[in-house]
Amino acid sequence: SQTIHQWPATLVQPVGSPLSLECTVEGTSNPNLYWYRQAAGRGLQLLFYSVGIGQISSEVPQNLSASRPQDRQFILSSKKLLLSDSGFYLCAWGNNRATEAFFGQGTRLTVV
Amino acid sequence: AQSVTQLGSHVSVSEGALVLLRCNYSSSVPPYLFWYVQYPNQGLQLLLKYTTGATLVKGINGFEAEFKKSETSFHLTKPSAHMSDAAEYFCAVSGYGGSQGNLIFGKGTKLSVKP
């Protein structure tokens, strides 16, 4: 069966520090991969999606970037965090028919 | 392009009462529709989905939803609320293929269940 791993679960980082969040999927090949951010009262905002290795699409301009170095690995990064980057970050995978998406347990990022 | 509107950011019901969470969507292609549930500090769990076929779909934990194309709605219901149903619920829409294959979420509805 398919599983998705996301870490760390919580993270407290100072303003201006770098960020790296990792997500890996097991039990499937060539998945679509997604990074969402959840801020209080704003629902889930799609940040990045990827349909294959090295293929990244950004949905909103921001201080973050994403990379997909391997088929089942998706990384969210920042060179310098801002206070506004605080939030709950969720990784998800889906098939290319978009019949559903499966989510990781999320990372609570607090920038101080 | 797709969008989702969830009416009511907070809904409160008594235990045993009907649960009704509203969702309206906009889509330029035939939509796929989803309801997810999120418990505090956890990821999202799929409750149910509509892709094609029967418009009344049943999900886990006694929830169901009906796709009404004429009303562009996909409301979530449960006949009798349980304390364990207290959580945040998200409606989502996607369309087949390309960037329309991405799930677009509503802002969520927080459900409280009173004893």
Image (cartoon, helix red, strand yellow):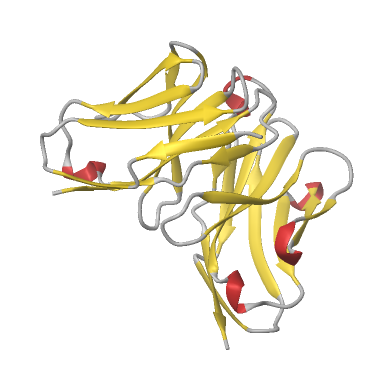
- Viewer-nearest residue: A31 or B56: A31
Q: Compared with residue A25, is residue A29 higher up or lower down, i.e. above or below?
A: above
* Residue B50 falls left or right of residue B7: right
Asked which quadrant contains residue B62, the reply is bottom right
Residue A102 at x, y = what percent? 58, 39
* Residue A52 falls left or right of residue A112: right
Instruction: Looking at this view, name the residue that lies furthest to the bottom.
Output: B115
- Viewer-nearest residue: B5 or A45: A45
Label total for image: 0
User: Quarter holding the N terminus of chain B?
Assistant: top right
Asked which quadrant contains residue A101, the reply is top right
Residue B97 at x, y = what percent? 66, 21
Residue sitting at x 25%, y 41%:
A85
Instruction: Looking at this view, name the residue that lies furthest to the right.
Output: B54
- Viewer-nearest residue: B111 or A70: A70
User: Quarter holding the C terminus of chain B?
Assistant: bottom right
Residue A22 at x, y = what percent? 36, 30
* Residue B83 falls left or right of residue B96: left
Residue sitting at x 64%, y 65%:
B21
Asked which quadrant contains residue A73, the reply is top left
* Residue A20 falls left or right of residue B84: left
Residue A89 at x, y = what percent? 38, 42
Residue sitting at x 35%, y 47%:
A9
Q: Compared with residue A109, is residue A20 higher up or lower down, i.e. above or below?
A: above
